[in-house]
Amino acid sequence: MTSKIAFLVEGSLEMGMGHIYKSITLAEELQDKGEICFLTRSAQIAVNQIENSGFRALKLKNDDEVARCLEEIKPDVVIIDRLEVEEFFAKKLKNDLNTRLVIFDNLSAANKHADVVINAGVGSNFENKRFIDKNTNTLYYYGPKYLVLRKEFYEFKAKGKRLNDKIRRILLIFGGSDPSNLTSKVLDELLTWHKELKTDVILGSGFVYSDELNRVLKKHQSQKGNAKVYQNIKNVAELMHKADLVIASPGLSMFEAFCVGTPVIAISQTQFHKNLFDKFFPTLHEDEIGKLKDIISAGDFLKPDTEYIKNLDMGEGKAEIVKEIRGCLEM
């Protein structure tokens, strides 16, 4: 009998698309185990991203509709990848569906109703640990070791990398939607003061500031050839590996850069980002973009060869997570 896996995931221009991308990566690892369906309350941009990755997506209005849909699907495993899951919703899924429940990136009381909880960033203090809550029998995975990265990042990590003394090529990547339009602001700054720097710019599927980005490129017409813009590409890991420096929002892209061995300057999109990361990975704010020249000249960025970052074991526990979820399907 074919197993059924349901993903409940959210993403938007405002909140970003990180949860969508991560869930798609995980779904690709599990698709040989059975039928996969995504359920989302998000806008059409999220649905398009899921469907373009080859998976079925249902757009629903609220959690009541989600619950009714799940009752029809009768999944063997439900995977929730969104912030602030409400406890009554998680409890209802467990009581009504007799399913295994896996929750990512959540700190609410809903976790006590889950079989497995994976918090690679939020709430982990970036310390890797695995434990069972004896009161609820919930299995927890905490820390960057349990990030779900795409397989190409592990491939480029295996190649190794030698860091250059001089920064000649920079990669800009600010997630699927870049809600603060950091792409245009940072590129404008880089093209203003550095005449020979090569800059690769990766835009996510939800980027809506193309007009402003084109104005920046037109403003710096004489250096336009030094900037290459990409969108919806498959070789992000390759471009990160080639870069001498990645400028990104703190989060998945930052950890992907560390994985392939490239230094990072992190610029927060939101106060939530800054609160979550600042104690562990110093970040800039949007109004500090003007400091980039001094920071880059001084080499004052996050380096993946430091002991602290090396010991985070970014994504090394992915196989453990996949094995655990596969085990849920066999119960």
Image: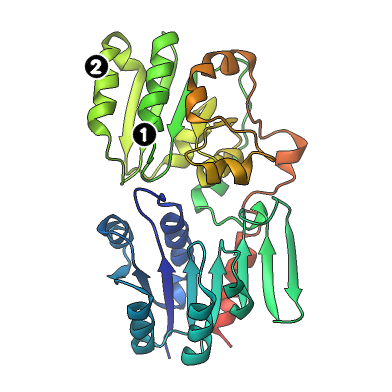
Residue 203 in the image: state x and y as whole percent: 35, 38
Q: Nearer the viewer, mark 1 or mark 2?
A: 1
The answer to which of 75 and 280 lies nearer the viewer is 280
SS of the residue under disc 1: loop
Residue 95 in the image: state x and y as whole percent: 52, 90
Q: Does residue 77 lie above or below 302 as drawn? A: below
Residue at image point 36% right, 44% down: 177
Tag 2: Cα neighbours inside 10 Å, few (<14), some, or many (≥20)?
A: few
Q: Earlier in the sequence, mark 1 or mark 2?
A: 1
Drawn side of residue 145 relative to residue 44, left or right: right
The answer to which of 125 and 225 lies nearer the viewer is 125
Specify the label residue 181 is tagged with. Answer: 1
In the figure, residue 20 lies in which quadrant? bottom left
The answer, for residue 126, to whether it is visible in the render is: yes
The residue at which mark 2 appears reads as: 218
Residue 199 in the image: state x and y as whole percent: 41, 23
Residue at image point 43% right, 91% down: 1
Compute the Cα span from label 1 to label 2: 17 Å
Drawn side of residue 38 relative to residue 309, left or right: left
Tag 1: Cα neighbours inside 10 Å, few (<14), some, or many (≥20)?
A: some
Drawn side of residue 201 relative to residue 283, left or right: left
**Amino acid on which the number 2 mark rests in the picture:** Lys
